Amino acid sequence: MRSVDTNLITENIKMLLLNASYNIGDKTLNILKESCENENNQVSKSVLQQIIKNDEIAFNEQIPMCQDTGMAVIFLEIGQDVNLTGKNLNDAVNEGVRQAYDEGYLRKSVVDDPLFDRKNTKDNTPAIIHTEIVSGDKIKITVAPKGFGSENMSAIKMLKPSDGVEGVKNFILDTVKNAGPNPCPPIVVGVGIGGTFEKCAYLAKKALSREIKEHNKSEKYAELEKEMLDEINKLNIGPAGFGGNTTALSVHIEYFPTHIAGLPVAVNICCHAYRHDSIIF
């Protein structure tokens, strides 16, 4: 049994959130550059050039790449042989979020009551925390600050099993079509298939924590990811909605067993600020 003080979790949450806000990552930046070279619409090519310049400035000057610094989504994978000591785990996570958004001068966008009062919590807490117990004595933390211009364009649908693959494809495409320019394309599309109503939504969000263009390990689902990326890029929405062949940079699909009577599907859209970061310790 390995003991870990939750203060270490606080420190890492803070570090990861700051880095995710400033650093888009080399792989995503290179894909943006490749997309810019291949973009056939000159206005959209200019938009991509501005996005790339923005991301480079954010990294070099250590400032947020987007004014919407998001709601903090935290994935925790905790080994069953870890003994957590110190403060409550959720409190430790939220303290890391609080410190990051305060010290990094990140915009604080969380309101306490979603319907009536809607008062800003003034520290961007509480975070959305997903905790999974896994084998071993390690802890993996993944942070994904999620902006709501793209979050608001996400959707979920309880398809019938008879809708099959074509029903899933149509739902993904319809969701992206309906989103249009609103989620700040080029986008990354996370898709969750299976489970229950809430599980498929979680899977779609989890899919957006993967490295960009990291395909599903299942050959069938990997092929579906590639097919949907091609189909989405034929929609002519393009960067910022100006048209062209770069509506999406990547499609990530996660799946889970489901009930014989159902086919739940969720689509979670992320803007071009594909922000996430991870650590294992």
Image (cartoon, rainbow, N blue to C red):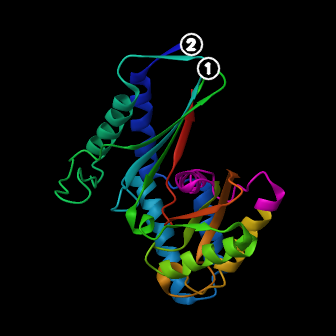
Q: Residue 236 placed where, x, y %?
A: 59, 87
> On the rendered image, what quadrant is the C terminus found in?
top right
- Residues at circles 1 and 2 in contact by the CB criterion of under 8 Å: yes
Residue at the front extreme, as displayed: 261
Which residue is labeled 2 in the image?
Answer: 2
| Pick the front one: 251 or 238 | 251
> On the rendered image, what quadrant is the N terminus found in?
top right
Q: Is residue 197 magenta?
A: yes
Residues drawn in magenta: 195-221
Q: Residue 169 placed where, x, y %?
A: 68, 74
Residue 69 shown left or right of residue 269 in the figure: left
Q: Residue at x 79, y 65 (%)?
A: 223
Quarter assignment of residue 132: top right
- Disc number placed over residue 36 in the picture, else none: none
Q: Earlier in the sequence, mark 1 or mark 2?
A: 2
Q: Which residue is drawn at 75% across and 67% down?
A: 224
Amino acid type, label 2 = Arg
Quarter assignment of residue 104: top left
Amino acid type, label 1 = Asp
> Is disc 1 placed on a helix, strand or loop?
loop
Residue 211 shown left or right of residue 65 in the figure: right
Which residue is labeled 1 in the image?
Answer: 137
Residue at the top extreme, as displayed: 1
Q: Does the magenta stretch include residue 182?
A: no
> Is disc 2 placed on a helix, strand or loop?
strand
Q: Residue 167 placed where, x, y %?
A: 68, 74
